[in-house]
Image (cartoon, rainbow, N blue to C red):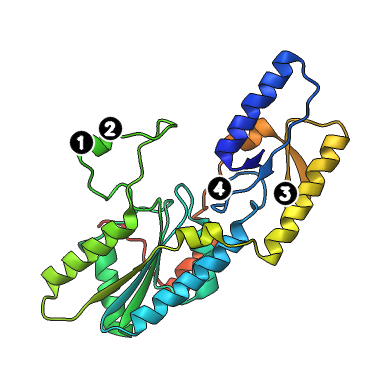
Amino acid sequence: AIGGDGTMRGAVAIFEEFKRRGLRISITGIPKTVDNDIGIIDRSFGFQTAVEIAQQAIDAAHVEAVSAVNGIGLVKLMGRSTGHIALHATLSSRDVDCCLIPEIDFHVEGKGGLFEFLYERIKKKGHAVVVVAEGAGQEVIPRTDDQKREQDESGNMLFLDVGPWLKSELGRWWKREHPTELFTVKYIDPTYMIRAVPANATDNLYCTLLAHSAIHGIMAGFTGFVPGPINGNYSYIPLEDIAVAKNPVDVNDHKWAWVRSVTDQPDFLKP
């Protein structure tokens, strides 16, 4: 069973049915999700390729922002529940002025808000680049009563598209606060570019190791497990544990501190 947490939950159900029927069938899972939101293991297959392509989108947004008067390059990256792609692509690029992920709250207008920060950055540099994960800012996007009731197949509230909303709000805010100044927002959504490209060499190697580990485990008589590296050591983890384990960005960790150092962005906390 090759996929993310949803696939792993399905694999658990199949595994339980195998046991109930007494079937001599082995089942194993391969952790493949570009969001890198599967817990316990070091990383999931596809993540490094996603970061590589995301960095190319950021580079394009930077060129567009620099080429315009008071230009903002806005890039929306995959990551509904975690901001790993946005975080690592920001660190890889070093051209990003602000990185927004689901694990941090922010407000857009007012003192200490996102728009105030971007205006100061534009006045200093002449442009700004913003990277936003698709799950960021869901609390600040206004919802209609119908949207508040809408749920996905798992019973979770449907995500609204933060990219076009943020682009629209930026334009509306600038026109109201700085009507005599030129302003441009270039919006890039590379979602399907990231999903469709072939895996890079690092992910190809990783996938080979996962496949070999899975087959070795099956041939050794194991079942109901997921192979994956834990602190660099390849291990067999119970399917049930992988299916429920989450992997959020630790905003108290050194990696998020590196992002704050690279972007020099504030906390965006309301006063």
The residue beneath circle 2 is 149
**On screen, 106 above or below 23?**
below
- Which of marks 1 and 4 precedes in the sequence? 4
The CA distance from mark 4 to mark 1 is: 30 Å
Type of amino acid under label 3: Ile
The CA distance from mark 2 to mark 3 is: 39 Å
Query: Of the residues tagged 2 and 4, which is closer to the observer?
Result: 2
- Residue at 72% from the left image edge and 49% from the top image edge: 230
The residue beneath circle 4 is 37
| Residue 213 spot, x, y in % from top left | 80, 46
Task: Tell me the element at label 1.
Answer: helix
The residue beneath circle 1 is 145
The residue beneath circle 3 is 230
Query: Of the residues tagged 1 and 3, which is closer to the observer?
Result: 1
- The one nearer the camera, 69 or 18, is 18
Task: Tell me the element at label 2.
Answer: helix
Check disc 2: other Cα within 10 Å, few if <14, some if 14-19, many if 20+: few
- Residue at 14% from the left image edge and 71% from the top image edge: 175
Kindly indicate whether the residue at mark 4 contacts the one at mark 2 (C-beta within 8 angstroms): no
- Residue at 64% from the left image edge and 28% from the top image edge: 12
- Which of marks 3 and 2 precedes in the sequence? 2
The CA distance from mark 3 to mark 4 is: 15 Å
- Whether residue 52 is visible, yes or no, is yes
State left or right for residue 12 relative to residue 143.
Answer: right
Check disc 4: other Cα within 10 Å, few if <14, some if 14-19, many if 20+: many
